[in-house]
Amino acid sequence: MGTGNESKICAKKADAKDWLAEAAHLSVYFSYYGELLGEKTKRIFEDYVANDMSLSEIAREYGLSRQGVYDVVKRCGAKLYEYEECLHLAERFRAMEEQAELIRSEAAELAKELDGAPEGERAKKIAQSAEELVGSLQ
Amino acid sequence: MAVKIRLRRMGQTHAPFYRVIVADERSPRDGRFIDEIGIYDPTKDPMEFRVDEEAAKKWLANGAQPTETVARLFKQAGIQK
C-alpha cells in the first residue's frame, strides 16, 4: 500500500541531479530511522544509498528481481520521509546544531572582549561549555 | 576482475560525507578498496566534489566502471576518459 510519500521519491540514480540531493536527505533520515525498517529491507536500502550499489548489483546479491529491489528502495524512502514528517528529528537536530554554533561563537567573542575584566573568568567558562556542547553534537 | 569507482558513505550520523573509492566490484561493503581518489560532500552549499583528476582518468582508461552516481558527478566535473 502506498504511503502518499512515494511520489516524492525519485530513487533513480539515472536522474542524478535529483537523486544526489535526495540521497543526501535519505542518508540522513536513514541514520535516524533506519532501525525502524525491517532487517532485510534496511540492508538493501543501505546498500543502495550508503554503499552506492546499483539495483542490479543488489538484485544479484539477494537473489531478487531488479524491480523487486526498486520497490523496496522506493517503499523504504517513503517510510523515512514519513517518519521525518511525524517526528522531525533530523530537522530539530539541525536547528539545535545551528543554535549551539551561534551560542559558541557569541560566547567566544564575549570571553575575548571581557578578558581581564572581573566577569572575564565567568565568560571564559561559558565559552568553554559552549565549545563542549558543539563538540558533543558532532 | 571488474573494478568499480563508487561512493562510500563516511561522516557523522547527521552529516553524510562520501569518499570516492576504486574497489573490486565484489567488495562493495567489506571496507576494502584499491584506491581513494576523492571526496563528495553533499551537505555543503553548493555541494563539494573534489577528485584527483589524473587518477580518475587513469582508472577510467584502465576499464574501471563508475557507478551511475559517480559517472554523473564526473560528468558535472568535466572528467572523461
Image: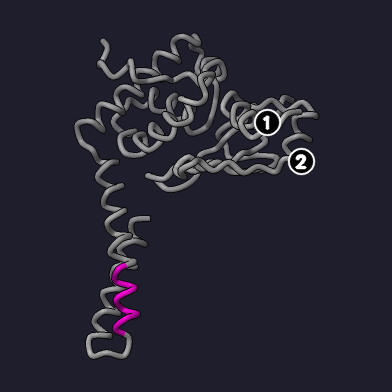
Q: Residues within 10 Å of mark 2 (few under 14, many from 20)?
A: few
Q: Residues within 10 Å of mark 1 (few under 14, many from 20)?
A: some
* Horizontal and vertical percent position of residue B51: 65, 42
B40 horizontally vs A31: left or right: right
Q: Residue furthest left?
A: A86
Name the kind of residue labelled 1 in the image.
Asp
A29 horizontally vs A48: left or right: left
Contact check, label 2 and label 1, Cβ < 8 Å: no
First in residue order: circle 2 vs circle 1: 1
B36 horizontally vs A94: left or right: right
Identified at 71% across, 28% down, the residue is B3
Identified at 26% across, 33% down, the residue is A84
- Quarter of the image for residue A22 reads top left
- The residue nearer to you, when weighing B5 against A59, is B5
Identified at 59% across, 23% down, the residue is B68
What's the magenta bit mostly, secondary-structure-wise? helix
Does the magenta segment cover residue A42? no
User: What residue did someone put label 1 on?
Assistant: B24
- The residue nearer to you, when weighing B72 against B46, is B46
Between circles 2 and 1, the one closer to the viewer is: 2
Name the kind of residue labelled 2 in the image.
Glu
Please, is residue A69 above or below residue B33 in the view? above
Residue A93 numbered tag: none
Q: Is residue A128 visible?
A: no
Chain at numbered mark 2:
B
Please, is residue A61 above or below residue B39 in the view? above
Q: Which residues are magenta?
A: A106-114
Q: In the structure shown, which secondary structural element does the residue marked by tag 1 occupy? A: strand
User: What residue did someone put label 2 on?
Assistant: B54
Chain at numbered mark 1:
B
- Quarter of the image for residue A135 reads bottom left
- Quarter of the image for residue A42 reads top left
